Amino acid sequence: MACKICGGEVKMRKFTAEINEKDFGKEVELCGWVHEVRDLGGLVFVVLRDREGFAQITLPKKAVDREMFRRARKVRRESVVRVKGTVKAEEKAPNGFEIIPEEFEILNEADAPLPLEVTEKVPAELDTRLDSRFIDLRRPRVQAIFRIRHAMLQAIREFFDRRGFIEVNTPKIVSTATEGGTELFPITYFEREAFLNQSPQLYKQTLMAAGFERVLEIGPIFRAEEHNTIRHLNEAVSIDIEVSFTDHEGVMRYLEELVKYIHERISERCERYLEWIGVKIDIPEIPFTRLSYDEAVEIVKGKGEEVNWGEDLSTSALKLVAEDYSGYYFIVDWPTESKPFYAMPHENDPEISKTFDLMHGWLEIASGAQRIHIHDMLVRRIYEQGLSPESFGFYLQAFRYGMPPHAGWGMGLDRLVMAVLNLSNIREGVLFPRDRQRLVP
RNA sequence: GCCCGGGUGGUGUAGCCAGGCCUAACAUGCGGGCCUGUCGAGCCCGCGCCUCGGGUUCAAAUCCCGGCCCGGGCGCCA
């Protein structure tokens, strides 16, 4: 005998959003969660919610089975139900139709009280929501974020696939403790110490030596920084590319075209989800402004804040710059000393490097550079940054036997989601965020 | 890691400054009842809360110290 849920009658099952005029007068099957029950005595409305929307199940006492009427009236919110019934055109119903059920099966009754209100009658704090994320994610406006995030990931893969990129996966467990910059998470790897990788940088460069020419990686990165802000996570997803036989300008063009493409694709494909969260997408104009580090410093100094040339720009400095440059823009030509050892210095002025950050307002979204492909220059830069070439054995080897000139960048996907959807906290756009305090769920 | 602000029913808030009148209020929820067009349904009855530890005091949700946790900012970073 066919299973009621998954077999036999499955063809009849529809998402609420799939129901239209063609179904009027016909029988459909819906599965979902009980969003609300409005009991008017002789008439009961059950609002069924599924992934794609809502449908009103209407039970007039006199017109439906008595036992079913009693069951529907008493069902608790967020219980999982399967409803089979006739679609009836009804002006008074939301979306212009309602379902008069012949069957109303409670597949799994929900406990009460709920950890938070799915109906959003009472707001819940982000921390409460993250504690009960599975139920928070049922809320349409939360669901919408992840549907759009999915579309963004798809757009990224489409974009690079069409341009001849090879998507790769590099190890997340590594032995190298010293790319510099950030703190790493140490882990036990059998009898040795290992680390969770802070970035695929060294591996994607190695793949340039391997002749892959254009690689894309979408994967997690881990940073053990004890920061506590709305824009930092200890586990994030990074979009990384590396391209041979090009320079920083070449990969900046990929980046701005990609950002534009992502905006175009989600505004085409995610209309209803954007509506759920009340976000309007403006397609950014390319090319993005290229603001040099020196120009940024001048802006900040002009507004009365001190900047030591050579240092990274502070958050307050970036906020001052963002007063003049909203939306997406690049800050280019950073001091060589402020960037990682693998960034290529300019030939005519080695104090500055062929580097760039992609900004959205004051938020850094991506950073990249033309890389040093000359072995001896790279070793010298490693020393200058106070690091030890011995730590980079496998990496440096790759530069000795035919490493092409190359460039690349890494972009924080979670930050991009935050920027595009105007989220007030990066955690909103991550299913199960990892930060200084949160390891569960 | 540093600085500032917080922690009150399941959820979100009021009460704290000026300790007692708090047997802690409101909304939502939950349980029960009434109601045939709700869509934030309405009405009636009921249920449920002071973050933990220590201190001050005749008396602590309220004042003080510490822990844990949360929010924001900074540093660091993408």
Image (spheres, rainbow, N blue to C red):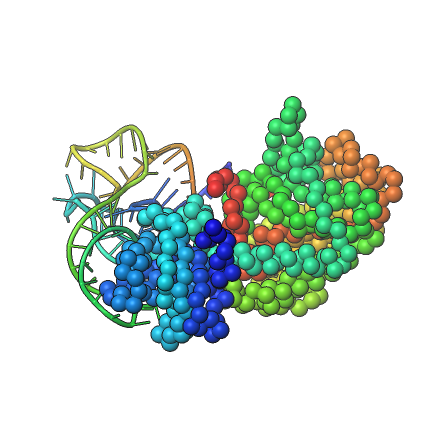
Query: Which residue is drawn at the image coordinates 37% and 71% (left, top)?
Result: A93
**Residue projecting furthest to the front:** A1
Residue A394, image x and y in percent? 78, 35
Q: Is residue A280 left or right of residue B31?
A: right
Query: Which residue is drawn at the image coordinates 32% and 54% (left, top)?
Result: A75
Q: Is residue A254 left or right of residue A280?
A: right
**Residue projecting furthest to the top:** A191
Query: Which residue is drawn at the image coordinates 55% and 58% (left, top)?
Result: A147
Residue A303, image x and y in percent? 59, 59
A102 and A318: which is toward the camera: A102
Q: How many labels, in total?
A: 0
Q: Quadrant of residue B42?
A: bottom left
Q: Is residue A40 left or right of residue A393?
A: left
**Residue projecting furthest to the bottom:** A91
Q: Does residue A210 appear in this view?
A: yes
Query: Which residue is drawn at the image coordinates 64% and 25% (left, top)?
Result: A190
Position above or below: A362 against A26 = above
A340 and A440: which is toward the camera: A440
Residue B75, image x and y in percent? 58, 44
Q: Quadrant of residue A154?
A: bottom right
Position above or below: A309 against A16 = above
Position above or below: A165 against A176 = below
Residue A276, image x and y in percent? 48, 64
Q: Does residue A126 appear in this view?
A: no
B32 and A252: which is toward the camera: B32
